[in-house]
Image (cartoon, coloured by chain):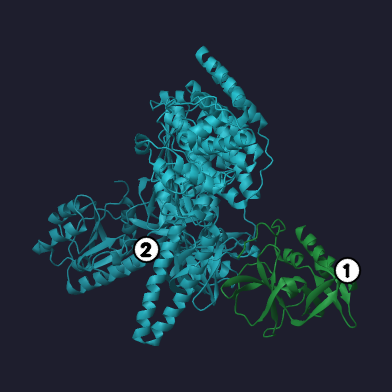
Chain colours: A green, B cyan
């Protein structure tokens, strides 16, 4: 898979810039290079009969992006009505951008890749599927998320292989 | 490799090759046309020459082989046959494939054309064998020339022969001859000339040679108009070129004969036009090439501009400041123009897609041994390039199908006294924002019955559906996946895949396709596609607080549909709305999008027309039409295909756009209902005498009852039917009503388990109801009920043909009598005891059915009825005697209701007799002034109002008139037959 090669190249460099986000109790790290920006409080258009992970469409300065709810994908209960959340605009390898709704956004950290450990089998299966590795910190385990794998999980039938057929905005 | 040079080469080669197919096919028709042959040769030669510069070995080899063959053909004046043309076409295909690969990857693709090259060589030898001994000699000379001119390095043998023919042998010869003469020598291109000179100079520099031969021979005037870009000649510094050019001698007659010569000599070499033909050159003079991507992004931005303009307009309009409004109007105007013109830049003539068709047809014809000509009309019709691209494959497929299945073998055509040569006609024209493309063949046509049996065997249609479906509707099944009627699966088409893909592809770009065919005459496919896709006009609708856009091109009309409208029908759980006599299936958007279940039919209906069918979308609100920019949806919406895209509205909110073709599939319309849909659409029965008729089935037989006699249609579990004594009853509303089983009435029997759902027709008359339990409700149709055959069974009025099937029309009164023989007599007895004399009614009606329907009503009311079949008959009766009331149909043969009315008005003795009109048309469709002439106008099959209305009028008469006229009873029973 293309995305894997892509990422492992990144990992080969020793320093990684990560944006930490929280979803439920789980902290995740997103590659800063893949995150364009974080937006809050955007108006969204709900798309009836869309795949369950899709929260809706948002208008980001004239571009229409699909907004995905990370909670939904990892099987967490729905966010309470009115609860605030943030949307990280990420760049998929297909060229399409997506919004990932997360509960909270932490900080940007610079991390040496050597500190990373392979994904432990004790991690919930859904996280294992999207994890490239974990970083153990004092009080938490940060999952380094493979965004492309995550997005692939949100697309209904698997025949919709990610990159080539994706519509580029 | 120099990228710029490469792209120049690709563009140029593509241009050169664009016309070559057509030229080759023309050559096939006119093998002796030297100009054509020259043109083809030049094109291939140029490609080959350029490849040499760019080091494209594979391409050069292929082109070279083709060029050699062409050269040989030209030299030997060999008349090409179709085989040679096929081979040459294959060669151009090979070149094109290589060019495509080169374009895609930037490097020459690894394609093995050695087999092709080998065959080209064989053909070349074959051509040679045809040539005479003199020509043999010529080829020997050629060999010799090649040897003599070895110093030139790798050059086309033909060039070498030409040089030899011009008596130019040495490098010095070349230099002496000069550029102008060389380039004007027949068979040499300017590029060749430059190359030769270049090599000659180099050779001389390396080893100065003695002038051996000074050629003074006249070169032919026939200079070729050559497309070669001599600016690409990389081995020469520009200064040299300039010198060469200015030094070239030029004779007056030559320059006059050739428009390009002065241009090439008087202007810097770089500026020599590169395009292939004169027309193209003049056309390209005022145009530039623009990257498609740039155009697309420009298009996007104009799209944004349109949106911003919309917002601006809203703000300015509400500001109330006239100056602002004026400025914003200007902005509006300019934006509109900008948009329109930008759209035009993306337009390409449809020819760009059609150009490949003659070739396809030719190859198909060869393979199938059929003779087919292609006629094209409207090639200049322009379409958005995205749409054009999308059309390419479906068109090819349709053409293949027409050639393969449509056009018959020559023998068959001869036997059918048709021209042996089949014709395939393509035409394109613009029709209000759409392009209509017709593909017509004069072939055998499609056998609807074969499609039908195939459809049945494939399980696409059930036997029952097949029995009622019309031919036109059957033909549309061609587009159904998995249907192909070719008896023999050929390698060209008929694999059972295809036409469904054709439809899908066309629908993807917002188009529609339908087919019509006549046996023995031909088949026509009609494709209707929008001009452009980027900016569309859309209807913005609201549903459960959400907004959606429906492309205007699919919207036929908007209807306001209150939930309590009498036009709603429910058939098999599917709501239908009666629109001008046709049943329109309606999709409740709220339900379909799973906002809410079991919603009522409140709101507005957007009537959507997707070519082969029409349906309604029930929405809450309609906000109006707006120009919107179509934006693609992300990867998550690949499965939800009913979204065609999305857009951003003036207020910045994203709005989904429906794809109406796909949306239709959300409506779970049974195929049966679909077949009915087709029938509905075709039927163009005049409104006259149409009436709603419920068709139901029992034991495989079909029966009809006029809807006017049915109060409701119920579906309930069998167990709701209870036993009360010997009879069966049903709790209906607050009453207990008798249940009659139709199966029992007609002497059949059916086992029903208590949990089965059964249909009940609730028949009502005044205050009394009964339920007629039937096996299956087929449909409610608005049809003329025309009773063809009378029946011996008292239960039936007779037999009518409904949807091509014999259907028994039920005499509801007989049925009701089965339950309660006194149902009617009660009123009658009351009437007869109260009246001294029986009031008389002259009932004028031409249709047996209505006579049979109304007479019992009149009987029930206790009137004596005289019956006339038309106005004239009525007059005859009226000459004789005077009734209390005249009840007449409006539309009748011989003398209609109006005529009768006028006749009656002229008779003083009839002045007191009220004339009541009976009609099958909705009353509001009759002009008020016409209505006023009558005492009253009533709907025939609305028994309730008929009864009440007549009673009222009769009471009125009775009060005014203490006496009544005795009349002869013509008919008080059900009259039957005409």
Image spot of residue B836 (x, y percent): 23, 68
Q: How many marks?
A: 2
Please tell me which residue lies in front, B922 or B268: B268
Give left or right: position of B870 versus B798: left
Q: Chain of mark 2?
A: B
Q: Chain of mark 1?
A: A
Image spot of residue B344 (x, y percent): 43, 59
Q: Residue at x 40, y 75 (%)?
A: B331
Image spot of residue A4 (x, y percent): 79, 61
Q: Which residue is mark 2?
A: B825
Please tell me which residue lies in front, B976 or B161: B161
Classify residue B860 by image quadrant: bottom left
Q: Residue at x 48, y 32 (%)?
A: B177
Please tell me whether residue B143 is drawn above or below residue B589 in the rendered image.
above
Q: Which residue is mark 1?
A: A119
The verdict on a common chain for dots 1 and 2 is no
């Amino acid at each position: 898979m293309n995305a894997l090669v892509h990422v492992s190249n990144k990992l080969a460099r020793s320093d990684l810039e990560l944006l930490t986000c929280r979803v439920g109790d789980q902290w995740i790290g997103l590659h800063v290079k893949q995150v364009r920006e974080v937006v809050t409080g955007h108006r969204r258009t709900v798309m009836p009969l869309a795949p369950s992970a899709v929260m809706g469409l948002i208008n980001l300065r004239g571009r229409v992006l699909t907004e995905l709810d990370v909670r939904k994908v990892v099987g967490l209960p729905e966010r309470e009505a009115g609860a605030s959340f943030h949307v990280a605009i990420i760049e998929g390898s297909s060229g399409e951008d997506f919004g990932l709704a997360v509960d909270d956004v932490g900080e940007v950290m610079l991390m040496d890749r050597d500190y990373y450990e392979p994904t432990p089998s004790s991690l919930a299966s859904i996280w294992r599927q999207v994890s490239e590795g974990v970083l153990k910190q004092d009080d938490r385990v940060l999952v380094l998320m493979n965004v492309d794998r995550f997005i692939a999980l949100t697309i209904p039938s698997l025949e919709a292989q990610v990159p080539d057929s994706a519509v580029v905005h | 490799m120099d990228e710029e040079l490469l792209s120049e080469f690709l563009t140029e080669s593509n241009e050169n090759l664009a016309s070559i197919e057509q030229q080759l096919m023309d050559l096939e028709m006119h093998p002796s046309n030297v100009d054509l042959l020259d043109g083809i040769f030049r094109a291939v030669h140029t490609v080959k020459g350029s490849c040499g510069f760019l080091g494209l070995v594979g391409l050069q080899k292929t082109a070279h082989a083709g060029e050699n063959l062409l050269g040989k053909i030209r030299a030997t004046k060999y008349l090409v046959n179709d085989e040679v043309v096929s081979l040459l076409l294959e060669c151009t295909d090979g070149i094109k494939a290589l060019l495509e690969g080169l374009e895609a990857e930037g490097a020459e693709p690894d394609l093995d054309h050695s087999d092709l090259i080998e065959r080209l060589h064989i053909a070349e030898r074959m051509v040679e064998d045809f040539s005479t001994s003199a020509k043999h000699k010529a080829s020997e000379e050629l060999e010799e020339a090649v040897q003599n001119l070895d110093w030139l390095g790798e050059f086309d043998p033909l060039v070498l022969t030409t040089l030899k023919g011009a008596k130019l042998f040495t490098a010095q010869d070349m230099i002496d001859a000069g550029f102008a003469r060389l380039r004007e020598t027949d068979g040499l291109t300017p590029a060749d000339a430059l190359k030769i000179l270049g090599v000659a100079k180099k050779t001389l520099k390396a080893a100065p040679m003695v002038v051996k031969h000074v050629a003074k021979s006249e070169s032919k005037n026939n200079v070729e108009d050559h497309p070669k870009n001599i600016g690409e000649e990389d081995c020469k510094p520009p200064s040299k070129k300039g010198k060469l050019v200015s030094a070239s001698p030029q004779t007056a007659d030559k320059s006059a004969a050739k428009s390009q010569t002065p241009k090439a000599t008087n202007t810097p070499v770089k500026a020599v036009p590169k395009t292939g033909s004169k027309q193209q050159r003049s056309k390209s003079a005022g145009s530039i090439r623009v990257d498609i991507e740039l155009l697309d992004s420009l298009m996007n931005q104009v799209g944004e501009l349109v949106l911003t303009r919309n917002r601006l307009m809203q703000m300015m309009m509400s500001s109330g400041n006239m100056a602002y409004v004026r400025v914003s109007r200007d902005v509006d105007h300019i934006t509109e123009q900008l948009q329109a013109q930008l759209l035009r830049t993306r337009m390409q003539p449809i020819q760009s897609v059609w150009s490949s068709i003659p070739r396809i047809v030719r190859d198909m014809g060869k393979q199938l041994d059929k003779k087919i000509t292609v006629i094209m009309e409207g090639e200049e019709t322009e379409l958005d390039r995205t749409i054009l691209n999308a059309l390419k494959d479906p068109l090819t497929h349709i053409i293949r199908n027409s050639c393969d299945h449509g056009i018959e073998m020559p023998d068959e055509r001869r036997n059918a006294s048709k021209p042996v040569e089949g014709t395939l006609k393509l035409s394109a024209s613009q029709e209000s924002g759409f392009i209509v493309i017709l593909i017509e063949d004069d072939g055998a046509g499609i056998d609807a019955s074969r499609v039908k049996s195939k459809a049945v065997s494939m399980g696409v249609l059930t036997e029952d559906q097949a029995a009622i479906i019309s031919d036109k509707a059957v033909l549309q099944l061609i587009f159904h996946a998995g249907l192909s009627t070719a008896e023999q699966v050929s390698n060209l088409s008929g694999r059972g895949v295809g036409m469904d893909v054709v439809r899908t592809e066309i629908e993807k770009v917002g188009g529609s396709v339908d087919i019509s065919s006549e046996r023995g005459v031909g088949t026509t496919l009609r494709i209707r596609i929008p001009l452009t896709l980027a900016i569309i006009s859309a209807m913005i609708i609201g549903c459960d607080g959400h907004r959606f856009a429906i492309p205007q091109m699919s919207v036929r009309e908007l209807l306001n549909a209150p939930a309590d409208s009498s036009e709603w029908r429910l058939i098999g759980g599917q709501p239908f709305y009666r629109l001008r006599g046709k049943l329109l299936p309606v999709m409740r958007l709220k339900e379909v999008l799973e906002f809410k279940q079991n919603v009522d039919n409140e709101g507005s209906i957007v009537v959507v027309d997707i070519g082969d069918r029409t349906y309604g979308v029930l929405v809450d609100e309609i906000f109006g039409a707006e120009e919107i920019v179509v934006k693609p949806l992300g990867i998550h919406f690949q499965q939800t295909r009913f979204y065609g895209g999305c857009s951003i509205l003036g207020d910045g909110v994203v709005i989904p756009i429906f794809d109406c073709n796909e949306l239709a599939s959300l409506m779970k319309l049974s195929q049966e209902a679909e077949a009915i849909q087709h029938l509905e659409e075709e039927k163009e029965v005049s409104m006259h005498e149409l009436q709603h008729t419920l068709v139901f089935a029992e034991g495989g037989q079909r029966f009809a009852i006029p809807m006017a006699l049915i109060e409701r249609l119920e579906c309930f579990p069998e167990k709701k039917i209870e036993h009360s004594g010997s009879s069966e009853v049903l709790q209906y509303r607050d009453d207990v009503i008798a249940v009659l089983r139709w199966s029992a009435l007609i002497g059949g029997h059916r086992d029903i388990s208590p949990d089965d759902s059964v249909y009940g027709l609730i028949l009502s008359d005044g205050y009394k109801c009964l339920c007629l339990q039937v096996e299956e409700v087929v449909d409610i149709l608005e049809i003329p009920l025309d009773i063809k055959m009378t029946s011996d069974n008292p239960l039936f009025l007779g037999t009518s043909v409904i949807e091509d099937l014999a259907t028994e029309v039920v005499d509801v009164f007989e049925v009701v009598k089965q339950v309660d023989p006194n149902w009617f007599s009660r009123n009658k007895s009351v009437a007869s005891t109260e009246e001294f004399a029986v009031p008389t009614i002259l009932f004028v009606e031409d249709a047996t059915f209505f006579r049979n329907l109304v007479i019992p009503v009149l009987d029930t009311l206790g009137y004596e009825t005289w019956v006339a079949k038309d106005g004239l008959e009525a007059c005859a009766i009226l000459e004789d005697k005077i009734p209390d009331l005249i009840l007449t149909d409006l539309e009748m043969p011989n003398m209609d209701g109006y005529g009768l009315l006028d006749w009656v008005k002229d008779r003083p003795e009839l002045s007191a007799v009220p004339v009541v009109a009976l009609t099958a048309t909705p009353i509001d469709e009759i002009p008020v002034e016409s209505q006023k002439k009558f005492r009253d106008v009533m709907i025939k099959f609305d028994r309730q109002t008929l009864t009440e209305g007549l009673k009222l009028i009769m009471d009125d008469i009775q009060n005014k008139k203490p006496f009544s006229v005795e009349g002869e009873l013509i008919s008080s029973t059900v009259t039957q037959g005409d």
